[in-house]
Image: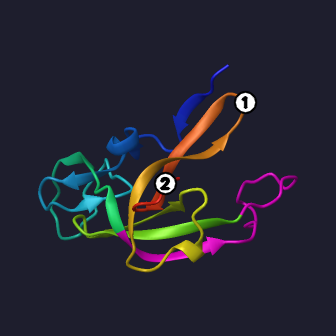
Amino acid sequence: MSRACTPVVANWFAGEGEDFRLLGTRCSACAAVFFPREDGFCRNPGCGGGELVEVSLSRRGRIWSYTDGRYRPPAPYVSDPELPWQPYTLIAVELEAERMVVLGQSAPGVSVADLEVGMEVEVVPGVLDEDDETTWTTWHWQPVGVSA
């Protein structure tokens, strides 16, 4: 039986392979870009507001900062205490065209030892969790030229 692929958060990313992109919104009045997306109103306090249009964000950016999570966070973080804790790496990536920093996990197998500030990375599809019925999909950051 195959599992249903379900995005962890609807409408935050789309596509597959080379077409995989994070999705944001852009204000038609002031051109401000938002991620996570904003569908209600322009968050720019200096803008009178405009239509918010979905846009694909840049696929590549440069590492602005990074860290690793080596401990299980306390409640209300949800995790199975019966399973061993798996450390993970978080990367803050600057998207130059959008003038923003987007946070995300590194691709599997990429640790802080593999990273440096300023390194070019690209967004790739990822898996956050799986159960018997569902594969919960997300995005990961992967150094350019490295296969996951």
Gap between marks 1 and 2 measured at Cα = 27 Å
Q: What residue type is labelled 2?
A: Ser
Task: Give residue 67's position: percent from left, percent from top.
Answer: 57, 75
The part of the image, by quadrant, that contains residue 64 is: bottom left
Seen at 40% across and 47% down, the residue is: 12
Q: What element carries label 1?
A: loop
Which span of residues is magenta-colored? 62-86
Instruction: Identify residue for label 2.
Output: 147
Q: Nearer the viewer, mark 1 or mark 2?
A: 2
- The quadrant the N terminus occupies is top right
Task: Give residue 145's position: percent from left, percent from top.
Answer: 41, 60
Seen at 72% across and 54% down, the residue is: 78
- Please name whichever residue, 75 or 87, is drawn nearer the observer in this view of the structure: 87
Q: What residue type is labelled 1?
A: Asp
Instruction: Identify residue for label 1.
Output: 132
- Please name whichever residue, 97 or 30, is drawn nearer the observer in this view of the structure: 97
In reply to whether residue 81 is colored magenta, the answer given is yes
Q: What element carries label 2?
A: loop
